[in-house]
Image (cartoon, rainbow, N blue to C red):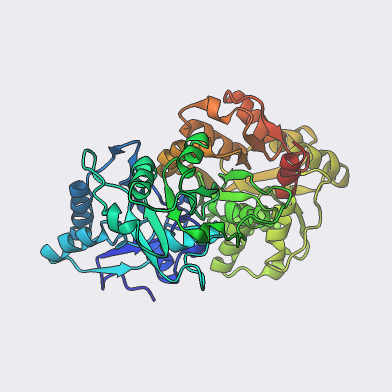
């Protein structure tokens, strides 16, 4: 069991971007943190692993402007650790490879604050590997050399190009895209072969990775033409002429498409798995959280006894209901004479986890279709128990009431907007080709947090008409709506564009 009392602070390297490169130790730290202090290079999907009550503190840098200076970062870590909270400092790559993790460690030592260092995969080899460039290759590059291409604002890039230009092996420059002209000139002016291989890897290992190859004499022009921006790494050497590509190499239906998933954490994880099978580059950023509403045991037992049909409108309702009857010791066999109904395939799959098959599911996964198809099967003795979100569509209760069917509308969860993700959403929104909205509540969260609604025009893919209606009412235009109201329908909608 994780014991966060042993260390008050963990300095954690999360790798170059692909969340699958997280170490098991890093994931354990993230999942148990009270406070996460993170950098600009952190993949937002990593933040989705944090506890729902964890504080997320951005300490990165965008366009030359720090949100927190290094001194402020140090003070923030120490302050929270000193108050008894477990602080995880998230850093791209490895904390001690040009990451100033050493300075943070010294600061903690000086103040007697216990800490640990959790090393991470570095971009200088993984970023190249994902680009299909091996950092060493027998007979061609038997060594490698890693340099920082970045200095504090106003300070010169004081690399020893005279000796670097004579060095054999692969040369890797991290954080150097703004100084690429100086690097190229420094190497050429000191006699390096202008036709030696060169490459630039932007956002290595991440959903929006781009790779450009050339020669030392041409790589600067390529970078300008392609408008390469940070984060990017530069590699010089004939290993750049190798192409061992595997990342996004195979042409699948959604290869090259950058897609943001914004639903609850559980649904995002489920959708992400299916989207990745289509070749899409996925970022998981759950903008809404489900909070359980507990039903009193006596009320739940009474409602179950009185009902003939139980209706679940989402997988969240299914999971919460079965957790509650388990907690109360209610025998699942008491449901033997109830007709279990669901609106969509996701709820049906959630039921299957508990060994239950849905008795009824409409041909189209929406409330209107459910009513049209279930009402002929109900009579005056029927009573429907709806277990759903606190704030839900009024289509179901109005339809049942109009048909004279008795029902109870019991909320089992509420949907809360996760405002902690607002900064990440607005920082990265321009990088995505499509943004998936899987519910009306998710649509509301998306639009409420986005600062420039124009960024969403033509990008939002809605799971169905109800969600689309909510988006339209919130001022979003050019919405793409799935014809089948589940993840397969969303994928098909994008494929058919």
The answer to whether residue 327 of the structure is visible from this angle is yes
Pinpoint residue 434: horizontal percent, then vertical percent: 62, 38
Q: Classify residue 403 as left or right of residue 96.
A: right
- Name the residue at 40% across, 49% down: 41
Q: Residue at x 19, y 57 (%)?
A: 78
Question: Which residue occupies the foreground of this view, 488 or 26?
Answer: 26
Direction from residue 161 to residue 433 in the image, left or right: right
Taking 185 as reference, is 344 left or right?
right
Looking at the picture, does residue 435 appear above or below residue 213?
A: above
Where residue 493 appears, as percent x and y from the top left, is 74, 40
Q: Quadrant of residue 131?
A: bottom right
Residue 199 point in image, percent of width and height: 49, 51
- Exactly how many numbered labels are in the figure? 0
Above or below 218: residue 297: below
What is the quadrant of the C terminus in the image?
top right
Residue 225 versus residue 186 in the image, above or below: above
491 and 486: which one is in front?
491
In the picture, which quadrant includes the N terminus?
A: bottom left
Task: Check the image and report above or below for 324 versus 366.
Answer: below
């Amino acid at each position: 069991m994780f014991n966060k009392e042993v260390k008050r602070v963990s300095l954690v390297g999360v790798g170059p971007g692909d969340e699958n490169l997280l170490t098991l130790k890093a994931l354990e730290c993230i999942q148990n943190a009270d406070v996460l202090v993170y950098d600009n290079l952190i993949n937002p999907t990593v933040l989705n692993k944090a506890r729902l009550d964890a504080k997320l503190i951005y300490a990165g840098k965008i366009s030359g402007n720090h949100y927190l200076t290094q001194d402020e970062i140090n003070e923030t870590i120490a302050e929270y650790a000193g108050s008894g909270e477990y602080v995880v400092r998230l850093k791209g790559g490895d904390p001690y490879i040009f990451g100033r993790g050493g300075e943070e460690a010294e600061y903690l030592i000086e103040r007697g604050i216990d800490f640990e260092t959790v090393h991470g995969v570095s971009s200088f080899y993984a970023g190249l590997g994902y680009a299909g460039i091996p950092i060493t290759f027998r007979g061609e590059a038997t060594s490698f050399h890693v340099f920082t291409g970045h200095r504090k604002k106003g300070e010169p890039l004081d690399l020893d190009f005279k000796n670097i230009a004579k060095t054999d092996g692969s040369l890797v420059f991290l954080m150097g895209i703004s100084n690429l002209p100086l690097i190229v000139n420094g190497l050429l002016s000191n006699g390096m072969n202008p036709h030696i291989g060169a490459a630039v890897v932007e956002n290595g290992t991440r959903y929006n990775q781009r790779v450009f190859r050339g020669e030392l004499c041409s790589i600067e022009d390529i970078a300008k033409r392609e408008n390469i921006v940070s984060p990017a790494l530069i590699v010089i050497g004939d290993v750049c002429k190798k192409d061992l590509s595997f990342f996004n190499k195979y042409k699948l239906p959604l290869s090259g498409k950058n897609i943001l998933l914004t639903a609850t954490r559980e649904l995002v994880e489920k959708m992400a798995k299916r989207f990745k099978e289509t070749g899409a580059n996925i970022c998981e950023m759950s903008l809404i959280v489900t909070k359980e509403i507990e039903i009193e045991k006596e009320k739940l037992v009474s409602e179950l006894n009185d009902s003939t049909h139980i209706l679940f409108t989402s997988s969240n309702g299914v999971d919460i209901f079965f957790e509650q009857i388990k907690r109360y010791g209610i025998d699942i066999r008491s449901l033997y004479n109830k007709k279990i109904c669901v609106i969509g395939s996701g709820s049906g799959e959630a039921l299957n986890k508990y060994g239950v098959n849905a008795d009824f599911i409409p041909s189209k996964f929406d409330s209107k279709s459910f009513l049209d198809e279930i009402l002929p099967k109900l009579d005056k003795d029927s009573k429907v128990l709806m277990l759903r979100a606190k704030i839900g569509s009024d289509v179901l209760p109005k339809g049942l009431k109009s048909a004279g069917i008795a029902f109870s509308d019991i909320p089992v969860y509420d949907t809360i907007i996760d405002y902690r993700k607002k900064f990440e959403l607005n920082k990265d929104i321009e990088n995505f080709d499509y943004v998936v909205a899987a519910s009306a509540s998710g649509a509301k969260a998306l639009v409420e947090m986005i600062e420039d609604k124009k960024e969403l025009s033509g990008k939002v893919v809605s799971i169905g008409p109800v969600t689309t209606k909510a988006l339209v009412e919130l001022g979003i235009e050019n919405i793409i709506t799935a014809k089948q109201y589940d993840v397969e329908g969303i994928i098909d909608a994008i494929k058919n564009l």
